Amino acid sequence: MLLEGLFDYLGDRLKNFDKFQPQKCSANTFFVEPLLTIFEERIFKQSKSNFVQYITLFIVGHVESRNFLSKNALNACKLYMERILSFLILRAFPTRASG
């Protein structure tokens, strides 16, 4: 139920993206950064969690949902997708610190 409620919230936020986003706030600050922070600090650290990865897939899936999203919402989804993929790639292939 909690995951379904979260999906409803994110879906509503994406559908009404232009209405909710403050004019002086970028999509990165308004949408992407908070989700990335949650992902990095809460979701990624959860071991044995079977459902939290669907949050990322839910957002990424909306990149293809051009029917009901504004251009700003699509751009925010694309930016999130790029940032989360970069995070996961860097996490999978860490660079060695030179010493």
Image (spheres, grey):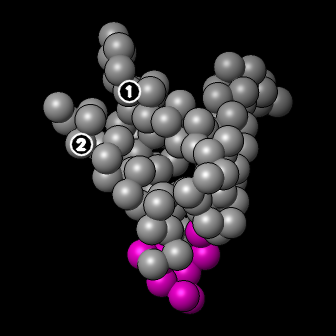
Query: Which residue is identified by label 2?
Result: 5
Residue at screen point 38% across, 27% down: 52
Please give the range of residues in magenta.
20-27
Residue at screen point 44% across, 27% down: 54
* Predominant secondary structure, magenta span: loop
* Horizontal side of residue 53 vs 50, given as left or right: right
Q: Position of residue 94 (x, y in %)?
A: 72, 24
Give the amino acid at mark 2. Gly
* Horizontal side of residue 4 vs 63, given as left or right: left
Q: Which mark identifies residue 63?
A: none
* Horizontal side of residue 36 vs 93, given as left or right: left
Residue that lies at the very extreme toward the front in this rendered image: 67
Location of residue 1 with respect to 23 vertically, above or below: above
Query: Which residue is identified by label 1?
Result: 52
Residue at screen point 36% across, 37% down: 42
* Horizontal side of residue 38 vs 27, given as left or right: left
Q: CA distance from mark 1 to mark 2?
A: 13 Å
